[in-house]
């Protein structure tokens, strides 16, 4: 829709900057506002988004903007929920945060049938699912049986989701589901290698053996069905082949290593020959069976097939050749010269391959040669000249293969070699690190010029990708010169958005990806305060809304959208507002009436996804639980009560001496008496729900020496972290 209506781009950009400003502002945890004001601000933004959605719904020309604001209202609700967690020190990036946001997002997606809400709901579901299994700041070590249940359950669940997306005709979402299914399957099988299963070194041996056999059989059957019916999308073929390679290669190499040690090339070379043979037969089969399809299906199938097998082939070749050279030179010897020789041999042999059906062989050998070329450069890390010397043949090969797709490989490699050499030279010359920023920026400008000069050639597209990447990575320093770099980057992005030079996906998608990546990069980059970024982004959003009002709305076309129920949306807004208010009131009651206690701790400080900086806390009572878990024959697990008892120590807080509590015993939930904290124990790890303390941005050093947490504990065992002392 955006591609046909350029006038809407300023509005969309304004929305992106607007929501980024909101997220950055609340993540900064600015101490200038107290809790009630922050809650009022977050609810105001939620109501503004909802009101704008309802207002645009009545418009004949811009009714589609109501969907954009509807989407934004869900994001605003997520920010409000995250803010509550931040103010009352709930678990950072907790699955509860995403679960609470998922409910209205999924509800609205199903009733509105709006595609971006499908994507948002799916993303929220994945965050909820995986953060429940692997909470932030914890490292659960699941047993074999638990892993089997978790990942088989994930595979079945995502299989149903895959079918659901296919039923809704959401092809791209079904592809994402397929990737997740394959990721779960390969992770489960590769953490229980076939060799270990056959050696009976894992639990549930028969089950895992059947799973290995079933996975191999599935891939074989899929390939046969794909070639015979030719109904599956080529991307599905690429996913299955790629992940099967990631399954097969580690299993074969691991088994070989267990049997004969480091000489894995004995298995690697035959495996590489089998892959080459399969690729030749496969490409011939695709060429003959694709006659009944249009050229697009055949072109995409060949591209995905070649890309997947070339990647797997490169892995096999690099490990096998390295093992072979290691046998000849000794694994502790100098590999530098051998890297250069292998690079020349692989690239030369790859370029000598001309047959179309041998495309995978050609690409694998060339990519392997480039890997060894950079291995040679890095192995000579104490010298600068190898990078510049290696760049010369790479540039020459780029020119020779200028009109072929392979030229992209050599062009990217030449850029990498030159940049590595220049940055190493600056480092050796003790030039300030900030100069590398301008080196990257200069490389970005150079690549932008190459793109404009050769935009219809493969090299031009590669230059465009590099220009975005280098320019994005140059945005790290403070000062007015950094502001100039930011302005140039945004101008470059906006220019490509407003006046695109190409209409291909490989051009349009990277532009938007770089634009979104800019906000992610700026969020986790500490050169500028989040508060300052927030204000800047808000002003930019106003600028683009003004551009749309003056120019954009005159250069757009009416688009009919499905009308959604005002009552349903209004009910969702009311429930969201009530939830925020009730949760905040509940937390305030606990702060006011809860039993106050001090607990010993040990902090570190990362940054949450949307909630800002926080201190991650470890408690002494968690160490006590771990000790009891190791010593007790039947330690309590799952939901438990930590019965607390005061020690002789006290901590001063608000003019009072607060007793420091310690764990007296750990009992099943509901069996504790006196002052207890609810917890969840698993494999010796105890989670209390008060492990994260949110702090104002850039104040981590002020909290490093805190030794105790002041918490409020309710009668039912719920606890809330008030401050650190």
Image: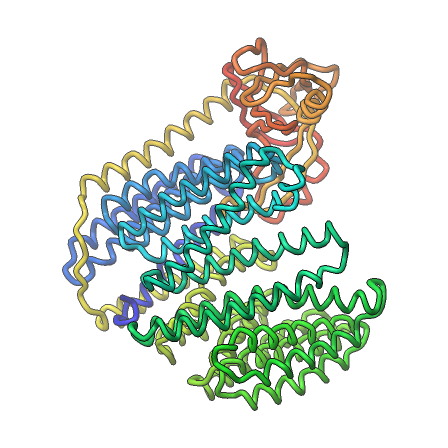
Whether residue 38 is visible, yes or no, is no
Give the camera-side residue of 620 and 614.
620
- Asked if residue 674 is positioned above or below residue 601 in the image, the reply reads above
Which of the 4 image quarters holds residue 348?
bottom right
Viewport quadrant of the N terminus: bottom left
Q: Residue at x 27, y 49 (%)?
A: 167
Where is residue 283 drawn, in percent x and y? 45, 72
Where is residue 185 drawn, in percent x and y? 51, 47
Whether residue 353 is visible, yes or no, is yes
- In-image side of 411 versus 492 (left or right): right
Give the camera-side residue of 150 and 454.
150
- In-image side of 177 versus 578 (left or right): right
- In-image side of 79 versus 654 (left or right): left
Where is residue 641 drawn, in percent x and y? 57, 17
- Asked if residue 261 is positioned above or below residue 378 in the image, the reply reads above
Viewport quadrant of the C terminus: top right
Where is residue 400 drawn, in percent x and y? 56, 90
Q: Residue at x 30, y 49 (%)?
A: 49
Give the camera-side residue of 69 and 673.
673
Q: Residue at x 48, y 36 (%)?
A: 85
Q: How is the image coloured?
A: rainbow
Give the camera-side residue of 232 and 680.
232
């Amino acid at each position: 829709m955006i591609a046909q209506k350029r006038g809407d781009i300023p509005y969309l950009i304004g929305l992106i900057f607007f929501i980024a400003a909101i997220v950055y502002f609340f993540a900064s945890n600015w101490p200038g506002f107290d809790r009630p004001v922050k809650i009022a601000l977050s609810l105001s933004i939620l109501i503004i988004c909802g009101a704008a959605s309802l207002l645009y719904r009545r418009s004949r020309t811009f009714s589609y903007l109501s969907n954009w604001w509807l989407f934004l209202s869900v994001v605003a609700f997520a920010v409000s929920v995250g803010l509550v967690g931040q103010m009352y020190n709930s678990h950072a990036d907790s699955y509860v945060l995403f679960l609470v946001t998922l409910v209205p997002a999924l509800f609205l997606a199903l009733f509105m049938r709006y595609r971006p809400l499908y994507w948002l709901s799916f993303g929220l579901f994945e965050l909820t699912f995986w953060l429940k299994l692997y909470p932030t700041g914890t490292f659960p070590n699941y047993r074999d049986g638990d892993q089997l249940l978790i990942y088989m359950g994930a595979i079945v669940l995502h299989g149903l989701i895959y079918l659901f997306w296919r039923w809704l005709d959401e092809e791209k979402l079904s592809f994402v589901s397929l990737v997740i299914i394959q990721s779960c399957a390969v992770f489960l099988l590769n953490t229980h290698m076939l060799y270990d299963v056959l050696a009976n070194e894992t639990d549930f041996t028969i089950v895992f053996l059947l799973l290995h056999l079933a996975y191999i059989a599935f891939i074989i059957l899929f390939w046969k069905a794909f070639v015979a019916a030719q109904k599956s999308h080529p991307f599905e073929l690429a996913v299955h082949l790629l992940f099967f390679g990631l399954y097969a290669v580690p299993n074969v190499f691991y088994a070989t290593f267990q049997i004969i040690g480091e000489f894995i090339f004995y298995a690697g070379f035959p495996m590489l020959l089998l892959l080459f043979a399969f690729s030749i037969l496969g490409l011939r089969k695709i060429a003959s069976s694709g006659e009944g399809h249009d050229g697009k299906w055949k072109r995409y199938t060949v591209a995905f097939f070649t890309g997947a097998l070339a990647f797997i082939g490169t892995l096999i070749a690099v490990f096998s050749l390295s093992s072979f050279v290691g046998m000849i030179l000794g694994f502790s010897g100098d590999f530098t010269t051998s890297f250069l020789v292998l690079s020349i041999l692989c690239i030369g042999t790859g370029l000598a391959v001309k047959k179309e059906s041998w495309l995978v062989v050609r690409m694998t050998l060339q990519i392997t040669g480039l890997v060894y070329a950079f291995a040679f450069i890095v192995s000579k890390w104490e010298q600068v000249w190898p990078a510049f010397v290696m760049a010369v043949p790479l540039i020459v090969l780029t020119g020779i293969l200028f009109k072929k797709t392979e030229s992209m490989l050599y062009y990217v490699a030449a850029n990498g070699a030159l940049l590595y050499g220049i940055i190493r030279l600056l480092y050796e010359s003790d030039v300030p690190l900030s100069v590398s920023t301008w080196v990257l920026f200069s490389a970005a400008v150079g690549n932008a010029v190459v793109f404009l000069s050769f935009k219809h050639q493969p090299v031009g597209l590669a230059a465009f990708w590099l220009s975005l990447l280098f320019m994005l990575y140059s945005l790290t320093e403070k000062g007015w010169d950094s502001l100039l770099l930011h302005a140039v980057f945004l101008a470059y992005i906006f220019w490509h958005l407003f006046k695109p030079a190409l209409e291909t996906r490989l051009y349009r998608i990277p532009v938007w990806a770089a634009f979104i990546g800019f906000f992610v990069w700026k969020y986790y980059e500490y050169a500028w305060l989040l508060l300052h970024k927030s204000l800047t982004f808000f002003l930019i959003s106003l600028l683009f809304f003004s551009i749309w009002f003056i120019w954009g709305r005159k250069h757009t076309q009416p688009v009919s959208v499905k009308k959604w129920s005002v009552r349903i949306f209004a009910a969702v807004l009311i429930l969201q507002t009530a939830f925020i208010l009730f949760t905040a009131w509940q937390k305030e009651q606990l702060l006011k009436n809860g039993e106050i206690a001090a607990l010993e701790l040990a902090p570190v400080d990362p940054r949450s996804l949307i909630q800002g900086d926080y201190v991650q806390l470890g408690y002494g009572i968690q160490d006590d639980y771990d000790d009891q878990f190791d010593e007790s024959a039947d330690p309590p697990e799952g939901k438990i009560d930590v019965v607390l008892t005061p020690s002789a120590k006290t901590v001063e807080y608000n003019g009072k001496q607060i007793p420091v509590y310690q764990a007296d015993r750990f009992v099943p939930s509901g069996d504790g008496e006196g002052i207890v904290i609810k917890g969840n124990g698993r494999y010796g790890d105890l989670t209390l729900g008060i492990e994260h303390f949110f702090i104002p941005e850039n104040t981590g050093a002020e909290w490093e020496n805190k030794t105790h947490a002041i918490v409020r504990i309710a009668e039912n065992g719920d606890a809330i972290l008030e401050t650190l002392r």
